[in-house]
Image: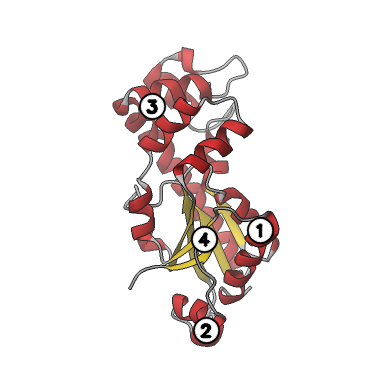
Amino acid sequence: MGPHVFGAAAALPPERVHAALGRPGGGVKPPLRVGLTGGIGSGKSTVLGMLSDLGAAVIDADAISRQVTAAGGAAIPVIAKQFGQRFIASDGALDRALMREHAYATPAARQQLEAIVHPLVGAASDRQVQLALAAGSRCIVLDIPLLVESGRWRQQVDQVVVVDCETATQIARVVARSTLTAQQVEAIIAAQASRALRLAAADIVICNEGLTLAQLQAEVARIATAFGL
């Protein structure tokens, strides 16, 4: 059975939303752990914000990654030792632009960086999950960009939600919001899990193609209802 699709590609009735979660009638037994992922420019962060607004406890792996690579972050001394001080900016944080260029040009360097950062992100995420559980959260959403690539995360979530769109749309969105060129965005997309692999891992797909913000909010709200929010 394939994933259930929401958004521009389909409009499912509520009973099929609940069936997608294996919880007839939407009777969610908390806490539900949801892994949210999607390629760069897919709109994943926007969906995460919407789920947060609807009451989900959200754990943002990207934000944690930025924290551990900020000035004084736990990853900084290890990165400086592994790659050299030139990869640390004058403010003491990781020089993200320089590291991005190096990591995407050198797969081994990217793997070395991930070996430093990912365990720190995983440990911090685990701590945040425990805090959310202690607070009685009904639904915990983990925003995990590398959910498909990592063998660690899939076993820790009940459902995988993939935010999807066309590759050309990803590129256009990222170029419009950042200083990256189309070629740089293409390199980032090529280094991530393929669109096909993400879709194959999904229980639920939000097709964020051609939707207005209000339409996307409506799709997210329908899913959130089935999540018990």
Of the pair 110 and 101, the residue shown nearer to us:
101
* Inter-mark Cα distance, 3 to 2: 44 Å
In the rendering, at what x and y percent does residue 16 appear? 49, 80
Which amino acid type corresponds to the residue marked 4 in the rendered image? Ile
Q: Name the residue under label 3.
A: 104
Give the labeled residue for mark 1.
50
Q: Which of marks 1 and 4 is nearer the N terminus?
A: 1
Name which residue lies at 52% across and 43% down.
Answer: 169
**Does residue 176 sit above or below 5 in this rendering?**
above
Give the quarter of the image for residue 140. Answer: bottom right
Q: Identify which residue, 106 or 72, lies in the foreground.
A: 106
Quadrant of the rendering where the C terminus is positioned: bottom right
Going by the image, does 14 lie left or right of 188?
right
Q: Name the residue under label 2.
A: 15
Q: Earlier in the sequence, mark 4 or mark 2?
A: 2
Q: Which of marks 1 and 3 is nearer the N terminus?
A: 1
Question: Would residue 138 be seen by someone viewing this image from the given angle?
Answer: no
Q: Do the residues labelled 1 and 3 touch (CB within 8 Å)?
A: no
Confirm or deny contact between disc 1 and disc 4 (CB under 8 A).
Answer: no
Give the mark nearest the N terminus, 3 or 2. 2
Query: Which element is circle 4 on?
Result: strand
Mark linked to residue 206: 4
Q: Where is residue 162 in the image (x, y as percent from the top left)?
A: 46, 57
Secondary structure of the residue carrying numbered label 1 = helix
What kind of residue is marked 2? Glu
